[in-house]
Image (tube, rainbow, N blue to C red):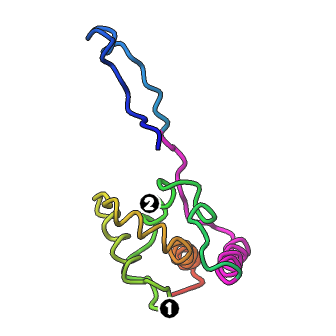
Amino acid sequence: MKDNKLDFSNMDIEDILNLDFDIEVSTKSVEYLKDIEEIENKITEVDRKKVLNSKVPYTEYFESEEELIETLKLIVPEKVGKHIQGFAFVKGFSKTVREGRELSKKQVTQCKRIASQIKLAYLEECKRQLGYIL
């Protein structure tokens, strides 16, 4: 495995302080979907992906970890249905991020494992926001 550590041993302190690192931060915000047909189509898409392949990577549902976490913020923990597989995890993770706390590395890994269910809980919340679910 290649060692990707940075080596500053041949630089003086002024050069190090003047380094400019390009850090990309995702600025994409997640919002509730407002079109019921689009929501239903997305639910069908998630269901099909899960049926056709049991090991679907989280990137099939979310573009990044940040989007996954931003989506969790939109899920109302008290309203996650028991039919969502891993609903206790979804509720707990959603509650954590809605309270402004960060998920641990292990929690983020678990979120990736249940990404399809997080997506379904989010889509149901979109339907709830539109008044289709009480």
Measure how far apart labels 2 and 1 are at the Cα level.
21 Å
The residue to which callout 2 is attached is: 69
**Total number of numbered labels?**
2
**In this view, which residue lies farthest toward the front?**
1
**In this view, which residue lies farthest toward the bottom?**
83
Q: Which mark is residue 29?
A: none
Picture coordinates of residue 19, whole percent (x, y): 38, 17
Identify the amino acid type marked 2.
Ile
Residue ID at (59%, 74%):
55
Q: Tell me where residue 69 sits by quadrant.
A: bottom left
Q: Tell me where residue 31 sits by quadrant.
A: bottom right
Residue ID at (53%, 79%):
128
32 lies left or right of 36: left
| Location of residue 33 with respect to 29 vertically, above or below | below
The span picked out in magenta is 25-51
Identify the amino acid type marked 1.
His
Q: Which mark is residue 83?
A: 1
Assess whether residue 39 is covered by the magenta stretch. Answer: yes
Residue closer to the observer: 7 or 56: 7
Label 1 SS: loop
